[in-house]
Image: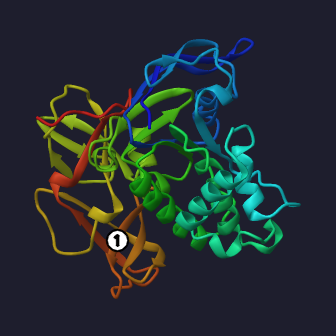
Amino acid sequence: MATIEIDRLVKAYGRTTVVHGIDLAIQDGEFVVLVGPSGCGKSTTLRMIAGLEEISGGQIRIDGRVVNDLQPKERNIAMVFQNYAIYPHVTVADNIAFGLYRSNLSKSEKRARVEQVAETLGLTHLLERRPSALSGGQRQRVAIGRAMVRDPSAFLFDEPLSNLDAQLRTQMRIEIKRLHHRLGTTSVFVTHDQVEAMTMADRIVVMREGRILQVGTPLELYENPVDVFTARFIGSPTMNLLPGALRNGRIELSAGGSLPATVATTTPEILVGVRPQDLMPTGSNATGLTLSGPVVVVETLGSETLVHIENDGQTIIGSAPGRLIPKVGENLTLHAPVDRLYYFDKATEKALAAR
């Protein structure tokens, strides 16, 4: 296992900088997820840790050792790719054993190591099959097995689940997390899927345009986003944002109505955020947020129903119990308690502290 420290890391292609001097410390045994939209620099950062991309500036340390100039094979890390990168013409056993290609182990020792990894991943009965006879989830487990067999200090995962269907994605993320609990190996996982980030990470790193916006546990990012981007990126469905103005000690909403000004700011223009899960058609709350409008879309999910209403020219998403299914076109009033609201400076999009 290993610590990974990134200090003022920069990556530039000619005059275009794609990673802007980021800092990050990953603890021994931690499972950290880098998340953000396509092009935010998360995969480039992972590839620099792996040694697959040259560093333009800054420093990477693995277990306290500077690895900037070390080849990938000298860093004692293993990477699992999006496209599996397994060989179709050889068996599962040979694919896993390929991770030991450069080792000095005897043939019997290699076989024992392969069998041990296969047992851990539930691949023992598949060792003599070829990849064409495997499902997508099984192929991904083979790719993980090839990384595991080397007993690396850290695992790096580059969007390994993106080629799987929804059911397999759910299954594989549970398997990877269970595997991490069993092995305790430091892991860095890249994804653009915030559900994967929320369900797998010890800590999440939110990236945008080559910069780190916020680092924290899933619950910290969900409950205390530092800006509008993080607030909308973390959580599904995305957070609703309502324009408002601070006047005479209250927040006047453009959608109508007002709220007590519970934020410490003199900024006149603000955004009020509310998550769909906190906005429900259950009773009124005089001190909270109330929004009304015609229902335009209903999404029935079983355990809950997502309700889209039209309000002040924008669509607001709320939630209702699964058996309460409003009709499209009916007028619906949604409420959220004041302590479940978020406030942001409209100009800077930074979160405003509570008073």
Quadrant in which the N terminus appears: top left
Residue 107 percent coordinates (x, y): 72, 52
**Residue farthest along the bottom direction in this orientation:** 323
Residue 10 percent coordinates (x, y): 58, 16
Q: Can residue 153 be seen in this view?
A: yes
Of 333 and 203, which appears nearest the observer?
203
Is 20 located above or below residue 33 in the figure?
Answer: above
Is 264 located above or below residue 21 in the figure?
Answer: below
Residue at image coords 58%, 50%: 148
Residue 162 percent coordinates (x, y): 65, 57
Classify residue 220 as left or right of residue 196. Answer: left
Q: Which residue is under mark 1?
A: 319
Which SS class for mark 1?
Answer: strand
Classify residue 334 as left or right of residue 231. Answer: left
Of 352 and 220, which appears nearest the observer?
220
Residue at image coords 60%, 16%: 68
Query: Residue flagged by tag 1: what amino acid is it?
Result: Ser
Residue 89 percent coordinates (x, y): 89, 60
Residue at image coords 66%, 65%: 164
Classify residue 282 as left or right of residue 52. Answer: left
